[in-house]
Amino acid sequence: MVSVEHIGEEDLEQYAMRTIPESACAALVWHLLVCQSCRDRLEATEGYLAAMRSAAAIKAAAMKAAAK
């Protein structure tokens, strides 16, 4: 049986935030092409990041409204 090393959480987060070093990007992209589990985890990570961005925007808008 072939052992597959999955992408670490930190690398998935960096990839989702477009901050992963270019030297690691090609191998990560290749792994995502062949690994459904990591694609699912990336999708969940992207969803989490989107929710955090949305929450930050709502908080900023509320703070701006309160300052008026």
Image (cartoon, helix red, strand yellow):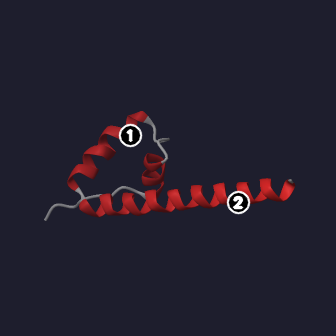
Label 1 residue SS = helix
Specify whether 34 is left or right of 12. left
Q: Which residue is mark 2?
A: 59
**Structural crowding at the residue carrying mark 1, measured as other residues with C-alpha within 10 Å and reported as few (<14), some (14–19) or many (≥20):** few
Cα gap from disc 2 to disc 1, whole angstroms: 34 Å
Q: Residue furthest top?
A: 22
**Structural crowding at the residue carrying mark 2, measured as other residues with C-alpha within 10 Å and reported as few (<14), some (14–19) or many (≥20):** few
**Residue at point 72%, 55% (across, down):** 61
* Residue 8 occupies quadrant: bottom left
**Residue at point 49%, 47% (across, down):** 17
Figure quadrant of the N terminus? bottom left
Horizontal and vertical percent position of residue 52: 58, 60
Give amino acid for label 2. Answer: Lys
**Residue at point 72%, 54% (across, down):** 60
Horizontal and vertical percent position of residue 16: 44, 49
* Residue 36 occupies quadrant: bottom left
**Residue at point 44%, 56% (across, down):** 46
Which tag, 2 or 1, sits closer to the chain's start? Answer: 1
Q: Which mark is residue 24?
A: 1
Residue nearer the viewer, 18 or 23: 18
Tags 2 and 1 touching, CB below 8 Å: no
